[in-house]
Every structure is written in C-alpha cells, then in structure tokens.
Image (cartoon, rainbow, N blue to C red):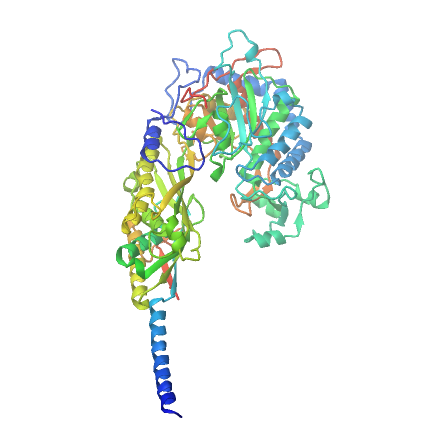
Amino acid sequence: MARNETMGKKWVGAGLALAGMLAASLAFAQNTEVLSVAFQGPGGHSNGNYGRASSVHAAARAIANMAATMDPASYVVSDFGGGNSVNSIASDAHFKVRLKGNAAAGREAVEAAVRSGIEAENDFRGVKAGDLTGNVPATIRYTIKP
Amino acid sequence: METAMMKTWVRILTVAAATMALAACGGGGPADTPPASADAPPAAKNVPVISPEVSAAAEAIHNDARIRKVVDEWQTAADAQYRYDTHLELARIAGPSRYESRRAAAIQARMLGEWGFDAADIMTRADGTLPGAGLQKVDGLPVYNVCARIKGSYADTPDAKSYKGQYPKVLVEGHIDSVNPSMLPPADQPFEPVKLQSMADAVVSSPEELAALLEELHFDAKGRVIHDAVYERAHRRFDDADAAQKGNALRHYVPGYNDDMGNTMTVLQIARMMKKYDIQPVYDVWICGTAGEEGKGNLAGMKQLYGYNQDTGKGNNALNFVADFGVDGSPKGGTINFVGSYRFQIKYQAPAELLRTGGVGPSPVDAAAMAVAKIAEIKTPWDDDKDQPKTTYTVGTMACEPANAKGVTPSCTMLVDMRSPLLESLNAIRARIEPLFKAGMEQENARFQAAADSPQAVTLKLEWFGDRPPHTNTNPSDVAIQAAWQAAQVTGVDKQDELSSGSGSLNNNVPAAMGVPTIDLGMFTTAASGGVHTFYEWGVPGNAELESKRMSRVMVATLIAAGFHTSDGKVIAPAAEPIGARTTEDQY
C-alpha cells in the first residue's frame, strides 16, 4: 500500500476514535435520562379529612426545592399531575425530570429535593412513618424510576 | 362596597379588590317568623320555639280532607309503582351538571302532558331562561332549571304586598344534575342503562364489571319502563338491607339513583298531587328540578332562582321567595347549617417565546409548584384550635399538558378548594391563598429575570371560580325550621329531639346566605344504597309507606309556610312574611 494510504488509515482510525469520544461526550451532555417520580398518600375528603398530608402538596414542594438547589440548565420538569377531584385531598402525584447534565449528580439532587419536600409535608401535617389514618399509611411516600 | 360586575367566565385574576368586596358582604337577613308568644318558655338552643299559629296550621293542614286524599293515594300500591317507574325513567336520562336540559325537558313534558299543568304555570323556558329571575346565566352558561307553579290566592287579595311586583312564593326543590356521567352523551344515546344485580353478589368494582351485568330494566320508545318479567322481580320494595338480602332484592345501578333523582322524583310528586287534588296555597308554591348542584355546577340553578351574583357575593331575590325547602337527602331532622367554599381553577401558561424556541426559561410547571408549595404552608385557625370554625383548603388536582416538540410544557392547571362554615373565615382563607397563585408565578419569572406579562414570562389565568356561600343558622325558630319541625310532629315521621348541628354543602347555601329561611330534608326511601358520586351508584327500592309519609311531611311544611285554603272554606294564613330576604337591591 502506498505510504499515503497507510497514513490515511491511521488518521481515519484516529478520527474515528476522536469522533467516538466526541459522540460519547455529546451524549453525556445531552443525557436524555428521564426520571419518573411518583408520590403516594392517604387521600381523603378535602373537608372531612382535612389535616392529612397531600401528595400534590408534597410534589410541589419537591419541584420548588429542585428550582432552589439545581441549575435550571441541567434539568426540565414535565408531566406534573395528581389528585382526584377539587374536593378531595390528593392521594397521588407524579412528575418527570429530564436530566441534561451529569446523570448521577442530577439524580442525587432530584432525590434530595423529593425527600426534603416529602419530609416538609409530613412534618407540617404532623405525621411520621408508621402512622395510620383511616387504616392506611398517613405519610407521603415516593418512588423514583428507573 | 361592591365591585363592578365582572362579566365573563374566563377572566384574568384580580386579587385584592374582589376579596375585599366579598369581605364586606354579610349573610343573614331579617328574621321572618311569627313571633313566639310573650310567655313561651325560653327556647333550648337546639329546639325551635313553635308559634301557636304554626302549631294550629300544621294540625289543620294535616287533617284536611283534600290533604288526606293526597296521602291516601300516595299510600296505594299503584302510586308506589308509579313513583318507582317515574324515578328510573328520569334517572336514566344522563344529566351532567350544566347539561341538564334533557332531564328538564322530560320533566316539563310530564308536567304539561300528564300532571295537568298549563303552559302558563311552567315558569322556566327550554333555553334555560327564567322570566323574572334575578339573573339568567351563571358561569356564562344557560341554567336548565324546570319549575312548575301552584298558583296561590294572595296576589288577588287587597293590600297584597309584593317586591318590585313579585308576589311572595315558597320554593320546594330537588336537583336534577348528577355527578356521573360527567360528559353529556350524544343525542341519539341519551340514556344510561339501569343495571340490575343480585344482592348476593359483591358490588361491582369497575365500569367494565358494571357493563358486563346481564340484567337490566327495559324501556320502550317513549322512555317508559316495560313491565316485563325482570321488572316484576326488580320493582319490589324492602324495609332495610337485611330484608333486601333475604328477599333476593335487586340492586339498581344508575348514576343519580340516590343523589338526587330519587328525592327529586318525590318533589315532583308533590307538584303532581297538589295539582290533581286542587291543593290551594295562599302564596304561590314553586316546585323545581334545579340545575347545577354538584361540583362544577356551582349551585347555578339556585343562583338563577335567587339572583345571587358570585362576583359580589350578594343576591337580590328578585322573584321574592320567602321560604325554601330543599330535598337532597338530609337525614330526618334536616340540615340547617351550610358549609361554604370557594374553588379556583388556575392555569399557568408558558412564555409564548419559549414555546416557539425551546431552551431554558420560566416554566408553568415550576410556577404552579412554587404557588402550591407556598399554599401548602398555610395553617388555618382550626389547625391550631379545634374550637375555631373548621376552615380547610387543599390543592385537589394538578394537570400539566405534555411538553411540546421543543420540550416546553405549554400549561399547567390546578383546582384549589377552600371551605368554612362562616363567611368571615372563608374570606380570610381566600385572602391568604389567592395572592399565592400570582406569587408562585412571580417567583418563577424572577428566577429568569423575565418581566411580568412579557413574551418571556409565565402568565396565569383564572379559568373558573366556584362560590358556595356559607351560613351557620342563627335563628333556630325561623319559619322553614318551625314548619319542617311541626310537620314532622303531626305526620309522625322523621321527628327529632333536637335540631341537627351538622352542616352540608347544598343548594340551600344560596338562600341561607341571603337570609331566606331554608332547610334541607329527605323524602326518598331505599332499603340499601351506595356509591354516591361514583359510576356504581346504586339502590334497592325502599318502604313505600314511609316515603309517602315523608312526602306528606314536606307538603305540610310547605303549606304551613305558604298558607292554605282548607276544604271547609277557611284560610290558614302563611307563616312566612310576604317580603323575602335579600342582600342587595341591585338588579342584574
């Protein structure tokens, strides 16, 4: 093979390797990991069961915490929803977080915000793990997937 | 101080002005009962003082020959069957709140075609207008009340008093909207099935299970129930759940069975019999199927009847109702205290620019969350002291649209509920919560230095405002309470030792807040029932004799308030004064 072609192959190889690294870092920067956060609580009638913790309230606190602690360029919250009717305490709530930066750090920050939001809601309504109301757990609990 | 009327259903939120105006409005009005005689013993706090006039009226009305004929007919097996038929023929017509026109039309057709009413005695129109009402539309929509009048003699008497030309009248009503189905079905499929199920089986737990039930009642092309073999098994009545189980009763599933088409059917029977037996009141009696009691119905029917303007929190009672009997299932003694609520439907919208370009900027999700996070920090006076009026709130629902192709959420909508039995504390919780809708938005916009109302900013819109005015009874001897109490005594049904201290959120909230004496009662009987406000609402037909006694009780109470021409030519004067209460003279 001519000397130029051999040199070409090396450059192509290097180029490919470089391209691979660039692609990986781009993928890293445009991380499309989406977290699904779900909240579960006791629900109840808005008047008759007033005083119970609310999943929508807890989820809102979590999202507000994220806004206070995370770089807005590093995440987007969407699909925030929950509750059953205007006159019932929300038994469920959910939202999604698309992380745009470092996935591990982002997830940790989201989880911290969720936990402190839930803790604040439970504390505000004077309930702790193990408490029951109407035979169901009185506290707000969460899951984060994946 | 009153705000200028805000016209539209969808409007930009204004914060303090409306709140302050509402705070200035009081509830309550002049007492309008005949005074207790001077040497009567002082009333126990929770027992009405019955005037001698009311006591005599109750006795005379209950024993009147024509009234006895009505009650005798109600107590026949044929009438029990007619009531069963009518109840289900009307309940099966879907009637979501604010979309009750089909039920209203069916009721009007019976009034005109079968129950002997003239067109002149149908006070409502098919288009939802009610000539003479204090206002017509509520939340921008027509109000599908259906009302028949039993005309009284009062207007023809010398010195008859009127309010701006409207003579006094007594209202008896039950609501014709039901929570389910929530959407009006197509015009060619207006009916819900009336499914039947053995009491031995478990109550259905899903809409699919309900649809899969094999047995149902059958109806002809005119909407009348067919008396076939399944009907014969279905229309049997039972005294209680135990008897129903033992007797192989059938559960009847149809939304509105209990709430409220059973009671409304009995209200209509009062109209039918007053007409049939020429029961002559002194004041006019209006018997109505009312619209919009449930949820987003926002008490529209009563707001039209009473001219109650929710922008001002005041009502003009242009039609001049002087006493009000609601029938929405209050146990026995009746409900006389009414919990009020405000509801807000708030929508946060993404900045117009961001929707187009995508990128990082203010989000309706964050704005909504920030507002709710602030609201969630509110402790009401009741939280700290259970002797305070029970004031409550919650953000009941949150729903955001999915993100668009640019990754931007276009909007988030939330429904907020706040309640209290007293206007002052209801207005106080509103004054704390309402500013926070905007505060959350401002916090989010500030995070990105987006100027308010600029294309870079999140905006907010008040989509719907719900108002159920509160009232805690201050006069346990008002004419409605005395009439209902004494009618129970003479008819021997639903007697109580004391007035109920319980409260409800009912159609009566509107007249009560305006000072019109009002009570909510129950007439319809079931042996067993369940699923109120759900897709699986059900009941088993109950004791017919008890039901007819309850109907006679409400009819007697109505005639105590409205006055009555006896079969032997005497006139029992109305217990209610001829000028009704109101909280404004403004006409709308």
Q: Farthest residue toward the bottom?
A: A1
Task: Give the quadrant of the N terminus of chain A.
Answer: bottom left
Residue drawn at (41%, 37%), measured in percent from left and top? B11
Asked whether B400 or B68 is in front, the reply is B400
Asked which quadrant contains residue A80, the reply is: bottom left
| Number of marks | 0
Residue B298 in the image, given as x and y percentages of width and height: 47, 35
Asked which quadrant contains residue B283, the reply is: top right
Left or right side of A32 for B130: right
Residue drawn at (30%, 45%), measured in percent from left and top? B451
Residue A103 appears anywhere in the view? yes
Asked whether B475 or B411 is in front, the reply is B411
Left or right side of B450 for B475: right
Residue B395 in the image, given as x and y percentages of width and height: 38, 46
Left or right side of B324 for B82: right
Task: Give the quadrant of the C terminus of chain A.
Answer: bottom left
Q: Is the residue B395 above or below the residue B112 in the image?
A: below
Asked whether B13 or B338 is in front, the reply is B13
